[in-house]
Each structure stands twice: as C-alpha cells, then as structure tokens.
C-alpha cells in the first residue's frame, strides 16, 4: 500500500544510491601539475635566495666589524710606513695621477683614474605595434594584426637591419663596417700621497663626468664639436644613417678627494682578507674617518639586504599563490590545520609567505646575533600560538568516544 502511494521514495531495501565526487589531491595535482611545478620552483627559489642573502649579510657585517677594529690610519700619507705592511689601512686625501690618459685623435688628455669613450651611430630602428584584426573576418579571436614603423636615432650598439620586417630602404651599416668602438681606459698609477691604489680600488671609480678638450682641436677633418660631443657628420641637424658621434667622460680626476681602505702591500693598497674570508676594498668620495667609512658600508649592506629580502618574499608569495588551489584543497581535507595556518585577517598565501621569510631570516642570524635571530623566529611563529592553543584546548575538551 505504501509503495503504491509513494512509488518514488526509496525504501528500506532500495538498491539505488548516489555517490558524490570527493575532492582528491591526486586528481588536482594531475590536472595542474605544470602550475604546481612553477609555484614550487618559485617558493624554493625565494627561500634559497633569502638563505643566501642572510648568509651574505652576516658575513659582510662581521667583516665590517672586524675591519673597524683592525683598521690603522697612518699619521701622514706622504710616507709609507713599513710597520703597517700587511695591515688594514685607511688612506684619505687628494688623488694624484702622474700619467694622463690620452686619445690623440681627438686631442683628449686628462689626469684621471678612468677615461671612457662612447661611440653612437645613427641607425634605423623598428617599432612593432599590435592591434586586433577586424572581428567580422576573424577565424581565430586571438588573431592580431602587426604593423611596423621605422625611425632613426643615435645608438651605442649595432642594430641588425636585416631582421626588420621591411628592409626596403632601411639599411644600417654592417657590423664589419662599424666606424669605431667604445673603449674604457684605466690608469695604472693613481695615488693618494705616496700610496698607490691597486687595480681593485681603481675599478671602483664608476661615477663619470663628460668633458671635451678646449685647447686642442680634433685631428680628424670634418669633425664638429657640439654640446660636448664629437660629430662625424656633414650636417649636425640632419645626420645620415652611418654617421657617428663620440663622447668622452672621466672618473677619479686628479685633485678630487677620496678615502680608500685596504691592505698595505709595499706602497700599494690592495684588497684585505678578513678572518672569515671576506674581502675588504673600500673606496668612498671625500675625506672620512674610520667610523664614518664603516658606518656607510654597514648602511649599504642593510639596504642591499632588505632589497633581497623583499625579492625573496615576493617570489615565495607568488609561488604560494600559484599553488593556491592545491593548498586550499589540502587544507580543506584538514580543517584544523586550516584554522591554524590561515589567519583571520590575512590570506593563506600572505601569512605562510611571511612566516617562511621571517623563519629563514631568523635562522641566518641565530649564530651571529642569537638575540635577533631568536626574536625573528618567535615573530614568525607568534601568529600561530593562539590558534594552536585553541586547537589543543578544543581537542582536550572533546568528550571521549563511547565504547
């Protein structure tokens, strides 16, 4: 009777049942394995970068502290004292450059640590623009129409015009026909008083100032000088493709005041190796004392460290974001773990990336500065203390299962 009145309702012995697809980590991993690999690679790379950066920062800080303790300031730079052989010395004063750097073709002569010559050639360059094609005639909605435009300008590198989409009328000089090459000359004799700066210190002159020779005209005919540039062109205002111009600049000119820190080797100041194996070879502008020099270097080290930290954290965050669907599925299967890791005010990726970053940074400083390292480790774990305590207390208050 009941079955005739309610034919669609399942009975006690009805063999029909419904089966729902349960979430599966294996299924999710198979469907998005490529994204998972990218996310995992970014997370590992960010963590490795943070670990390398903290090790570098710790070693540099140790080396600078050792340098400040061991540095010796000679009484005068006019005399090289033998008792300072092999020691870390600080030498400050005006640069002396006995031999000038020259470029006879353009009448250039300057007493400086470096002379840079930059050659720029007037060349064609190609610009590519993309726009969607007419939607009515589209076969593929992702098709785009490419248009190319061409113009000329000065470049200090060769542009291969044979690779242009339209080479008709757009020909640059072949690389074999390049008119001149850019050069950088370093002076082997740069001194402060009687101290000769080694090659490692001379290489650190990187701030260049442009100049021209006012006393000597170029020996090459047809060269015109305008705004500090030497033009090999018949018309400055309408140059032709293949014309070129040359600019000169110097760094570390004689008379400029600098401070150097390094190991005294004979009359030369060379890189100094610390007990930890780090190398100290410092060049700074102006006359400075030991405290100011090493304080500036420590500030530079901290700035560089924070830049790498931000880069490492960002890589971890992006990696976890790519792994977001897999992580969410894993935590859906473990609700208690989700309550522990995903803080209420932040996303899972943000909270975990900050924890990994702070933990890695803290581990890097535990040996060198235990207090700082332990504090960072505590900060990385602090947001999870309260959720963990609630989780443990909640589990302890659950009634025992009935027999």
Image (spheres, rainbow, N blue to C red):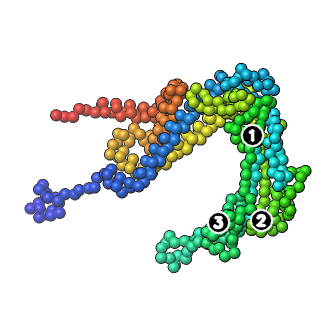
Provide residue 325's location: percent of width, then percent of height.
40, 51
Instruction: Judge by depth and name the residue closer to the eye, 250 or 12.
Output: 250
Nearest-to-viewer mark from 1 and 2: 1
Instruction: Judge by depth and name the residue closer to the eye, 16 or 219.
Output: 219
Looking at marks 2 and 3 on the same chain, the residue that comes earlier in the sequence is marked by 3
Q: Give me the disc on residue 243.
A: 2
| Position above or below: 219 against 264 | below
Whether tag 2 and tag 3 are in contact, CB under 8 A, the answer is no
Q: Give me the disc on residue 188.
A: 1
| CA gap, disc 1 and disc 2 | 34 Å
| Position above or below: 187 against 369 | below
Please give the residue where the numbered disc 3 appears in the rendered image: 160
| Position above or below: 334 against 173 | above
Q: Quadrant of residue 57?
A: top right
Q: Tell me which residue sits at (58%, 26%) in the image.
A: 275
Quick one: quadrant of the N terminus?
bottom left
Looking at marks 3 and 1 on the same chain, the residue that comes earlier in the sequence is marked by 3
Nearest-to-viewer mark from 3 and 1: 1
Q: Residue furthest right?
A: 215
Provide residue 260's location: percent of width, then percent of height.
72, 32
């Amino acid at each position: 009777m009941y079955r005739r009145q309610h034919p669609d309702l399942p009975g006690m012995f009805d063999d029909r049942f419904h089966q729902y697809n349960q979430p599966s980590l294996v299924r999710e991993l198979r469907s998005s394995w490529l994204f998972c690999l990218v996310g995992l690679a970014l997370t590992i790379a960010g963590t490795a970068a943070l670990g390398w950066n903290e090790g570098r920062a710790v070693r540099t800080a140790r080396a600078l502290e050792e340098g400040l303790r061991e540095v010796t300031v000679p009484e005068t730079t006019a005399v090289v004292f033998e008792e300072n052989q092999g020691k870390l010395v600080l030498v400050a004063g005006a640069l002396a450059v006995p031999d000038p750097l020259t470029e006879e073709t353009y009448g250039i002569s300057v007493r400086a640590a470096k002379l840079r010559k930059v050659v720029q050639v007037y060349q064609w360059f190609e610009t590519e623009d993309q726009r969607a094609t007419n939607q009515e005639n589209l076969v593929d909605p992702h098709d785009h129409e490419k248009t190319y435009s061409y113009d000329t300008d000065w470049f200090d590198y060769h542009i291969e015009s044979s690779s242009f989409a339209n080479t008709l009328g757009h020909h640059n000089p072949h690389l074999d026909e390049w008119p001149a090459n850019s050069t950088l000359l370093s002076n082997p004799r740069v001194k402060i008083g009687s101290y000769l700066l080694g090659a490692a210190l001379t290489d650190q002159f990187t701030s260049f100032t442009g100049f021209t020779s006012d006393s000597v005209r170029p020996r090459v005919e047809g060269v015109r000088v305008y705004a500090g540039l030497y033009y090999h062109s018949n018309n400055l205002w309408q140059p032709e493709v293949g014309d070129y111009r040359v600019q000169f600049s110097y760094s570390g000119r004689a008379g400029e005041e600098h401070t150097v820190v390094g190991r005294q080797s004979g009359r030369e100041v060379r890189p100094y190796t610390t007990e930890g194996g780090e190398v100290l070879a410092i060049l700074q502008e102006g006359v400075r004392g030991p405290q100011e020099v090493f304080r500036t270097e420590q500030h530079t080290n901290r700035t560089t460290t924070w830049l790498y930290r931000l880069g490492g954290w960002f890589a971890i965050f992006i990696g976890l974001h790519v792994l977001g669907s897999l992580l969410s599925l894993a935590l859906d299967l473990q609700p208690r773990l989700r309550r522990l890791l995903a803080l209420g005010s932040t996303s899972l990726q943000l909270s975990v990336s900050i924890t990994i970053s702070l933990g890695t940074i803290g581990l890097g400083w535990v040996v060198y500065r235990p207090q700082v390292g332990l504090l960072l480790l505590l900060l990385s774990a602090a947001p999870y203390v309260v959720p963990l305590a609630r989780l443990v207390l909640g589990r302890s208050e659950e009634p025992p299962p009935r027999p």
